[in-house]
Image: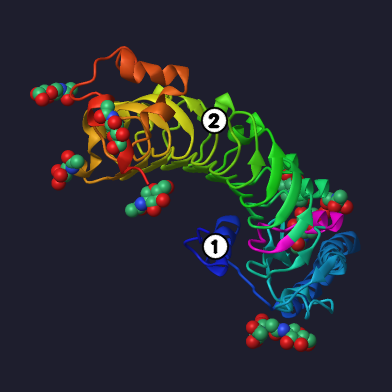
């Protein structure tokens, strides 16, 4: 699992700094804060306002108590102190002044990462009006994401990775207006990825290690994300447009067939590209290998039959690369000729050269490297 560069608390501070110009920030001190402000308000404003504010604070309590009721195993006792009205003292709960009314303090972050907690996400989570971060990495939450999460208009980061969520892609995340970071990897979501995912202003998309099928939507190119990981699904193809911000693209361990989309050549900021363990074929184009920031290019375990120019030795360019188990004539550790010939398109590699181009140097048969492969 990739860990995030900043701790939850640092991230909260960053976010809260974005939301509140005065940088007011309160963790685990809600009683004092709210009491102080309510006292203040009673003199200055209407009972209606006070009632509404109390309602949001009360909703946080209702939501967390409802959640606790559907938690069936909590081996590290994350939730054992989840009682009493001061929810800001609960383990894993972080509070901050509410954006729309800084005189009240609401739950702004939840971090139950690595809790090994088993249970469900209740509908009441939609009551956490101030929630900006929800990190549930490495637990045993199961079922589906409740539709009421669409109420969380401030939710900025959602990490439910490494749990047991099932069903189709959780469409509710598409309705979160503030969402910038989505990590749903290592669950059991299935079916197609919705094209709308790539129209959201996300910085990072992790959907790897699920059971997604069909193709990566054509509009992947509309995404603003700098990190997109599709690896370890059952996806059958992809087409990229102009994803100029992309730094990491990982589509390893899918079922992608056909050539490398030429549009990859436009990913000027790309640093890491993993196409490994698919069924791709044709030429590895030099345009990709000369991308200025490329430091790690993995295309092993495919059926490529030509490495154009510098693609044949990216070490000379200072990059890490892995071209094992393809069909490149003259290279070590390639697939057997038989395996390579098994698919129509790949016959070209031996009979007519790759993609109509002639291959410089030895042919696959002369090289006969199949016996190098374990
Ligand atoms: C809570 O805030 C008050 C001042 O508002 C401060 O005196 C007190 O030490 C704080 N308590 C904790 C636990 O941070
Ligand atoms: C009282 O509430 C109104 C809106 O309900 C708001 O415009 C006003 O600024 C508030 N006054 C104070 C002193 O908070
Ligand atoms: C959790 O609480 C139970 C009951 O109080 C205790 O037996 C157990 O050792 C605690 N587990 C941890 C990891 O602290
Ligand atoms: C917060 O305030 C903004 C602008 O005043 C408003 O559009 C939004 O609906 C409010 N959010 C909530 C949850 O009340
Ligand atoms: C959505 O938020 C509003 C305002 O906080 C609240 O009144 C409502 O009950 C919430 N709906 C759900 C389904 O959580
Ligand atoms: C290069 O990328 C591959 C696939 O993403 C990864 O397994 C490998 O560890 C990376 N190598 C380096 C040196 O970062
Ligand atoms: C690749 O390039 C590096 C550095 O230029 C060189 O040391 C290495 O021998 C080359 N490898 C092959 C297989 O040509
Ligand atoms: C083809 O091989 C010749 C001689 O070995 C070499 O001079 C030339 O640069 C090679 N062309 C390409 C495109 O690798
Ligand atoms: C390739 O190598 C294998 C194993 O060493 C051998 O059986 C086969 O005859 C060789 N084929 C050619 C065309 O040299």
- Is 147 on the left-hand or right-hand side of 164? right
- Is 332 on the left-hand or right-hand side of 170? left
- Is 163 on the left-hand or right-hand side of 299? right
> Marks 1 and 2: which is nearer the front?
2
Quarter of the rendered image showing ligand 1: bottom right
Q: Nearer the viewer, residue 69 or 110?
A: 69
Picture residue at 63% right of the left edge, 68% below the top? 114
Picture residue at 51% right of the left edge, 40% below the top? 225
In the picture, the disc for residue 159 is none
Q: Which residue is mark 1?
A: 11
Is residue 269 part of the magenta span, yes or no?
A: no
Q: Position of residue 71 (x, y in %)?
A: 82, 68
Span colored in magenta: 122-140
Q: Nearer the viewer, residue 276 or 137?
A: 276
Relative to 206, residue 303 above or below: above
Q: Position of residue 51 (x, y in %)?
A: 89, 63
Res 123 quadrant in image: bottom right
Looking at the rendered structure, the secondary structure element under dot 1 is helix
- Is 68 on the left-hand or right-hand side of 249? right
Count neighbours of disc 2 (C-alpha within 10 A) and say few if under 14, some if 14 to 19, many if 20 or more: many
Q: Position of residue 292 (x, y in %)?
A: 27, 37
Relative to 98, residue 234 above or below: above
Q: Which residue is mark 2?
A: 220
Colour approach in the figure:
rainbow
Count neighbours of disc 1 (C-alpha within 10 A) and say few if under 14, some if 14 to 19, many if 20 or more: some
Q: Is residue 264 visible?
A: no
- Label 1 vs label 2: CA separation? 27 Å
Picture residue at 60% right of the left edge, 68% below the top? 24
Q: Nearer the viewer, residue 242 or 277?
A: 277
Chain-order first, disc 1 or disc 2: 1
Respond yes or no on whether mark 2 lies under 8 Å from ligand 6.
Answer: no
């Amino acid at each position: 699992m990739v860990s995030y560069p900043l701790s939850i608390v640092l991230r909260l501070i960053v976010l809260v700094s974005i939301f509140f110009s005065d940088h007011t920030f309160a963790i685990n001190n809600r009683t004092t804060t709210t009491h102080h402000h309510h006292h203040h308000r009673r003199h200055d404003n209407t009972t209606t306002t006070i009632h509404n504010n109390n309602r949001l604070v009360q909703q946080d309590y209702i939501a967390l108590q409802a959640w606790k009721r559907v938690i069936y195993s909590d081996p590290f006792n994350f939730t054992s102190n989840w009682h009493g009205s001061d929810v800001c003292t609960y383990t894993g709960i972080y509070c901050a002044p509410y954006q729309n009314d800084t005189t009240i303090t609401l739950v702004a972050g939840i971090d139950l990462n690595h809790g090994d907690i088993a249970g469900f996400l209740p509908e009441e989570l939609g009551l956490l009006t101030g929630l900006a971060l929800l990190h549930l990495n490495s637990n045993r939450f199961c079922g589906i994401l409740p539709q009421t999460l669409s109420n969380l208009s401030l939710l900025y980061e959602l990490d439910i990775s490494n749990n047991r969520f099932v069903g189709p892609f959780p469409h509710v995340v598409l309705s979160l207006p503030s969402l910038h970071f989505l990590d749903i990897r290592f669950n059991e979501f299935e079916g197609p990825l919705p094209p709308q995912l790539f129209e959201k202003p996300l910085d990072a998309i992790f959907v790897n290690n699920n059971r997604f099928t069909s193709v990566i939507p054509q509009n992947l190119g509309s995404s603003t994300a700098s990190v997109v990981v599709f690896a370890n699904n059952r996806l059958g193809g992809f087409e990229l447009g102009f994803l100029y911000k992309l730094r990491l693209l990982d589509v390893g361990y899918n079922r992608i067939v056909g050539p490398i989309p030429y549009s990859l050549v436009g990913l000027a900021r790309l640093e890491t590209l993993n196409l490994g363990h698919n069924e791709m074929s044709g030429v590895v184009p030099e345009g990709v290998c000369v991308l200025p920031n490329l430091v790690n290019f993995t295309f092993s375990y495919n059926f490529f039959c030509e490495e154009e120019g510098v693609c044949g030795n990216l070490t000379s360019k200072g990059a890490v690369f892995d071209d094992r188990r393809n069909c490149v004539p003259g290279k070590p550790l390639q697939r057997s000729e038989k395996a390579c010939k098994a698919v129509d398109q790949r016959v070209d590699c031996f009979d007519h050269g790759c993609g109509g181009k002639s291959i410089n140097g030895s042919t696959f048969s002369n090289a006969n490297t199949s016996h190098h492969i374990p």
